[in-house]
Image: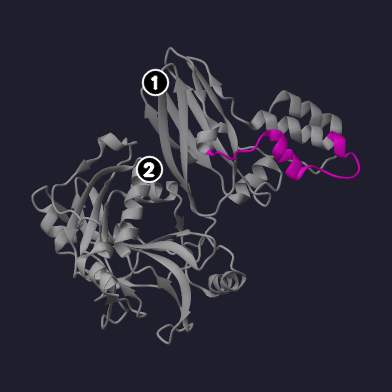
Amino acid sequence: MGLGVILLLLSAGCTSFEPAPMTAEALLSKAQTQTSGALEVSVVWLSDREVESSFGLPLSSAGIQPIWIRVTNRGEESCWLLPVVTDPHYFSAAEVLQKVKSLGYDAARKNRIKAVFLEEEMIEDFIPPGDMRQGFIYATRQPGMRQVPVMLLTSGRLDRFLFLLGGKTLRSDHRWVNFEGLYHPEEQVSLTAETLYESIRALPALTGNAHGTATGDPLNLVLIGSREEVFSGLIGAGWNETEALNPASAVHTVSALIAGTPYRFSPISPLYVFGRRQDVAFQKIRKNVQTRLHMRLWLTPCIYEGRPLWLGQISRDIGVRMTTKSPSLTTHLIDPDVDGDRWYLIQELIRQQCLARIGFVEGGPQFTPLNPGRNLTGDPYYTDGLRAVLLLSGEPMAVDEIDFWPWKFPPRGGLSQSGDYLRVGREE
């Protein structure tokens, strides 16, 4: 705490504003740290309870998430921190004060104390050579995990650090999954460049129900990357984790359906592969909970270049319809062109600059618009039968750096432009 705040606190007498800032040592013990050349960056995302204790203010309920950053510059040039990269909507100290300012008796003096404190807790943007700066960026609060990029500008160079933080404020569907314990070491299979194609081809083709008596949506993608790379890439591209299905989340979903409002973390129904429901699900909500893209992922026992393979299913919800095949008597209606949803994800990961290599492998049966497949609730879909194989990168990858496996390529124009479809259109 700075001298100015201490003096103001002493002069203010009795006040309910009693912050208890964590020491730098305590923060560093919780921090993730990365180094690039002469620059070192440490980042901490505090829990709601730690925020309230450290600041003595209800910042979490005001929609503010302070992110603590420490930048050590051991180089010979000055650098600048770019907070807008960490959060394009970050708050100034004065904006924060407006949300938590005191009212009533002696409010002016109390607010002066808060203003000085909030200013002094912010990190300075300029870091001279051989120096260190530490403090907070007042970011917008969001439940669940969060990708936290930190960018430093030096003369003629940008250094980007990428962190994945949070996850304690959302009861996500993967919260209790023991990813490290899903497979015994003897069950894991290390793949080589020569065995990768056939091993992916041999993975299950379709999702199923809990009893294994019926098949559903096609498994149309494979992500290769660590859990941090997969989660960070998707969350950075605007995908959200999903909440576990429970009475509270079910009520929230129904309320959002009735009101036609978005619910970013609405639960996703379980589908089964490897004898278990999805290990993690992500979604991207559109205007409301009825329209969204959603993705289910299962960790496989396969490892390539030290990274696990995730088998996935992606599709797009375009509405809601009645059905007797669901306990709730309703289900989302999917876009039948699931290959288009596969391509949507590829585009997003390219834009996010986290995609290193792309390939396509036969993954299941082919279906056309005139002879569609059916998922577990009876929705039709069509596909070329290929699954996208996407190798993720922990480092930013420009478009011209992306490589391709020379395996298979989707038919020109996709199945929606196939000859039988066009022929029927002409005959009509």
Which amino acid, by three-letter code, is at mark 2?
A: Arg
Seen from the viewer's position, the closer of residues 287 and 221 is: 287
Residue 280 drawn above or below residue 234: below
Could you tell me which residue is drawn at 62 percent across and 50 percent down?
49
Query: Magenta region: which residues?
Result: 87-109
**Quick check: 22 left or right of 203?**
right
Could you tell me which residue is drawn at 85 percent across and 45 percent down?
103
Secondary structure, mark 1, is: loop
**Quick check: 263 left or right of 374?**
right
**Quick check: 43 left or right of 410?**
right
Residue that carries the numbered disc 2 in the rendered image: 351
Residue 13 visible in rendering: no
Look at the image and say whether residue 106 sits in the magenta stretch.
yes
Seen from the viewer's position, the closer of residues 378 and 54 is: 378
Which amino acid, by three-letter code, is at mark 1?
A: Ala
* Structural distance between the alpha carbons of marks 1 and 2: 28 Å
Q: In the rendering, which numbered label is found on residue 38?
A: 1
Could you tell me which residue is drawn at 47 percent across and 79 percent down?
321
Task: Residue lying at the far right in this picture: please name it.
Answer: 105
Residue 258 drawn above or below residue 65: below
Secondary structure, mark 2, is: helix
Could you tell me which residue is drawn at 49 percent across and 41 percent down?
30
